[in-house]
Image (tube, grey):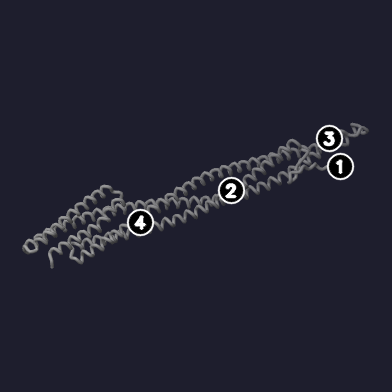
Amino acid sequence: GNPGLSFETTASCSQSVLEAVSPLLTFIGPVFYNIELKVEVESLKRELQERERLLVKASKAVESLAEAGGSEIQRVKEDARKKVQQVEDLLTKRILLLEKDVKAAQAELEKAFAGTETEKALRLSLESKLSEMKKMHKGDLAMALVLDEKDRLIEELKLSLKSKEALIQCLKEEKSQMASPDENVSSGDLRGLCAVPREEKERETEAAQMEHQKERNSFEERIQALEKDLREKEREIATEKKNSLKRDKAIQGLTMALKSKEKKVEELNSEIEKLSAAFAKARETLQKAQTQEFQGSEDYEAALSGKEALLAELRSQNLTKSAENHRLRRSIKKITQELSDLQQERERLEKDLEEAHREKSRGDCTIRGLTLFPGLFLNSWGQVILPPQFPE
């Protein structure tokens, strides 16, 4: 019943709305890094305080004029209602600004989502490269089998070469023995007895030498082919090392980008929680004002409900992005493990390649030894074997 108490209640409601909206308005500025918005909020707070002061003054005037008549009281009530309406209009404008800020935040989330899509494309590219590496690994295994087969052929050629050289040495010794016959035998008899065998031995010796030369040439050609294969293998390993370094750098950059995105998502979640708390407080205040017949509270509550729905949607989108980031992290961990396995396999292939180099060096030494000392040859353990002695 008392008009003064009614206006005090109105002033109290206005103060409650101010207390509920002020934290929200002062929080929006730092969240979206908008200094001009913060300045406007401070200006609005001062204006609302001025309005509140006027309402209190009007309430006191109503108390003093309570006995002056109902017409004057009605006029003061109407003025107070208009002032409250002005406050509501200002709040509506601020809500529109908040909607724009929420749209800006949504645009930022879309940008973050686009970055996530880019990271996903990069992950697919890494998976494709990993598949290519697996195919190359299979090719390396096939090359290792080919190298083993070539090593076996080299050993066989060495043994064949040793046997041919032993035969040539024996033929040379027989030829030298036939070149110095016994003094008691006359030269004419010697020519008659040894003419045919000597010519035959010489032909056999020349044929054996030609065969030996052909086999040596073939052996050298095989060695050159193996050297070419080894050089090609070394180039492939060097290229693979460069590609591995590039992949490691790409994975490191992707991991750092994911950590940055996760940090941004956490910050957005924290901001959304604070906004939700501020909106909840504002909604509670508006519900109290509704019980006291505060004008326009239904529209304001509906606007707050819309903001809460929008915030819930933003929170859901953030949770989705967080789940996607966690999935990408697991995928990167798996790819990193596979790359580590491939690195170990590559080291094993390098060891095999070094062993092939050592085998090639031993083959070169064998060729030089056979060239310098044709009367000697080596067995499969690298030991010197004397040629067999044929009876005279």
Q: Are marks 1 and 2 in contact (CB under 8 Å)?
A: no
Please name the residue that numbered disc 2 is placed on: 347
Label 4 – label 2 distance at C-alpha: 47 Å
Mark 2, Cα crowd under 10 Å, few <14 / some 14-19 / many 20+, is few
Please name the residue that numbered disc 3 is placed on: 176
Q: Earlier in the sequence, mark 1 or mark 4?
A: 4
Q: Nearer the viewer, residue 387 or 216?
A: 387
Q: Nearer the viewer, residue 260 or 108?
A: 260
The single residue placed furthest to the front in the displayed view is 64
Q: Is residue 57 left or right of residue 333?
A: left
Label 3 – label 1 distance at C-alpha: 14 Å
Q: Which corner quadrant holds the C terminus?
A: top right
Please name the residue that numbered disc 1 is placed on: 391
Percent x, y of residue 189: 90, 34
The single residue placed furthest to the right in the displayed view is 184
Q: Earlier in the sequence, mark 3 or mark 2?
A: 3
Q: Nearer the viewer, residue 146 or 9?
A: 9
What type is the residue that disc 4 sits on?
Ser
Callout 2: SS:
helix
Label 3 – label 2 distance at C-alpha: 56 Å
Percent x, y of residue 24: 27, 56
Mark count? 4
Please name the residue that numbered disc 4 is placed on: 270
Mark 4, Cα crowd under 10 Å, few <14 / some 14-19 / many 20+, is few
What type is the residue that disc 1 sits on?
Pro
Q: Is residue 332 left or right of residue 6?
A: right
Q: Earlier in the sequence, mark 4 or mark 3?
A: 3
Percent x, y of residue 276: 31, 59
